[in-house]
Image: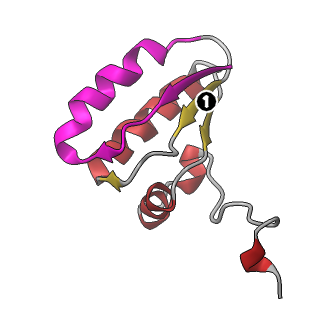
């Protein structure tokens, strides 16, 4: 499985760069992992680019999986109602986290 990493700053001013960064992976065969572990800032426009990317890959029969999405990234996807489109759960699996121990 190939991996493409997202930048820390996915503000509106970076959407053209994001689109160019993702373009070579659009037709890549097989599953693609998108590393969202560094995203600290994300704008609606970047989420729109990512949704279009995921949907285009899905239509071509290729899976796209987001890996280690930050809370910032996950919250933006949740607020915009695209968790399912991006294949993200509403909340990350924290079953092994100390915070979940009663």
Please say whether residue 32 is one of the residues in the magenta stretch: no
Q: What residue appears at the point 50 percent right and 63 percent down from the top-left corner?
A: 78
Near-viewer residue (94 or 91): 94
Q: Is residue 17 above or below residue 30?
A: below
Residue 74 coordinates in the image, percent (x, y):
51, 58
In-image side of 4 versus 43 (left or right): right
Scheme by which the image is coloured: secondary structure
Q: Give the left or right position of residue 72, taking residue 57 as reference.
A: left
Image x and y of residue 1, in percent = 69, 19
* Left or right side of 80 for 65: right
Q: Which residue is at a point 41% across and 48% down the rendered structure image?
A: 39
Would you place residue 14 above or below residue 40 in this image? above
Q: Give the magenta part as a residue range.
A: 1-28
Spot occupied by residue 11 in the image (x, y as percentages of width and height): 24, 48
Q: Badge 1: how crowded within 10 Å, few (<14), some, or many (20+)?
A: some
Instruction: Indicate the position of residue 82 as horizontal and vertical percent values.
Output: 50, 54
Q: Quarter of the image containing the C terminus?
A: bottom right
């Amino acid at each position: 499985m190939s991996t493409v990493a997202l930048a820390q700053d996915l503000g509106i001013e970076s959407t053209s760069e994001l689109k160019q960064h993702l373009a070579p992976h659009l037709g890549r065969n097989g599953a693609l992992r998108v590393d969202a572990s560094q995203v600290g800032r994300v704008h609606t426009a970047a989420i729109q680019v990512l949704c279009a990317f995921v949907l285009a890959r899905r239509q071509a029969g290729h899976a796209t999986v987001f890996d280690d999405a930050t809370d910032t990234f996950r919250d933006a996807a949740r607020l915009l109602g695209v968790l399912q489109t991006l294949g993200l759960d509403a909340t990350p699996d924290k079953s092994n986290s100390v915070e979940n121990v009663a």
